[in-house]
Image (tube, rainbow, N blue to C red):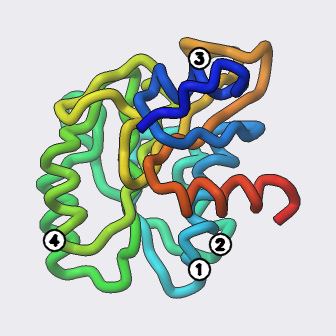
């Protein structure tokens, strides 16, 4: 259920994203980083990231000593889920995947979530380009995992320069991210 307290400054963002929890941070990069950190990932863990993305999608895991595993993109510039599936059958210690909804084009989230469940992956959507996007599962941001948004000056919705948010229906994850974003 959504928080319908109109005095809550995040009300409109939560409502728009159809998400139970939104944590505002200084950038999409911070949202991605904090989500991985809140899950407790670190040295020895790997994460999948597409080859065609902004550097932040890969560097956020490296902040935690995680190892990025790069996968090529399909014709829509989104991560190739056939390659992801093949990789997961042979690669060990992959704990997360960061799909990027490139230029507002959503990743096939139905298929991705089936893969994530089969291989026990945390799905952290890089939605820097997807604030207004609807995937084949619904509004990007309405997830039991997490989705990170950017409000940088060149994005769909801006805050006049920097800004980001993490959306999730997982209350515990949102509270960990909120605590970590305020000096831990």
Callouts 1 and 2 close, C-beta under 8 Å: yes
Q: Is 156 located above or below residue 162 in the figure?
A: above
Q: Earlier in the sequence, mark 3 or mark 1?
A: 1
Residue ID for mark 3: 155
| Disc marking residue 120 | none
What distance separates the C-alpha of mark 2 from that of mark 3?
Answer: 27 Å
Q: Earlier in the sequence, mark 1 or mark 2?
A: 1
Q: Position of residue 158 (x, y in %)?
A: 67, 15
Q: Position of residue 4 (x, y in %)?
A: 55, 25
Residue 54 falls left or right of residue 105: right
Q: Earlier in the sequence, mark 2 or mark 4?
A: 2
Residue 66 falls left or right of residue 112: right
Who is closer to the viewer here, 154 or 16? 16
| Disc marking residue 42 | 1
What distance separates the C-alpha of mark 3 from that of mark 1?
Answer: 30 Å
Who is closer to the viewer here, 12 or 150? 12
Q: Earlier in the sequence, mark 4 or mark 1?
A: 1
């Amino acid at each position: 259920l959504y928080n319908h307290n109109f005095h809550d400054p995040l009300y409109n963002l939560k409502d728009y994203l159809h998400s139970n929890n939104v944590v505002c941070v200084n950038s999409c990069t911070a949202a991605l980083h904090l989500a991985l950190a809140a899950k407790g990932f670190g040295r020895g863990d790997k994460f999948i990231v597409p080859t065609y993305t902004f550097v932040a999608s890969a560097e956020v895991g490296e902040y935690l000593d995680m190892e990025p595993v790069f996968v090529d993109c399909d014709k829509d510039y989104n991560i190739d889920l056939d390659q992801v599936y093949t990789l997961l059958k042979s690669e060990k210690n992959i704990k997360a995947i960061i799909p990027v909804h490139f230029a507002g084009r959503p990743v096939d989230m139905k298929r991705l979530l089936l893969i994530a469940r089969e291989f026990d992956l945390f799905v952290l959507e890089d939605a820097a380009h997807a604030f207004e996007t609807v995937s084949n599962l619904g509004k990007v941001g309405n997830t039991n995992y997490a989705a990170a948004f950017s409000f940088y000056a060149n994005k769909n919705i801006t805050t006049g320069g920097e800004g980001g948010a993490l959306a999730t229906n997982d209350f515990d994850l949102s509270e960990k991210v909120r605590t970590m974003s305020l000096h831990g």
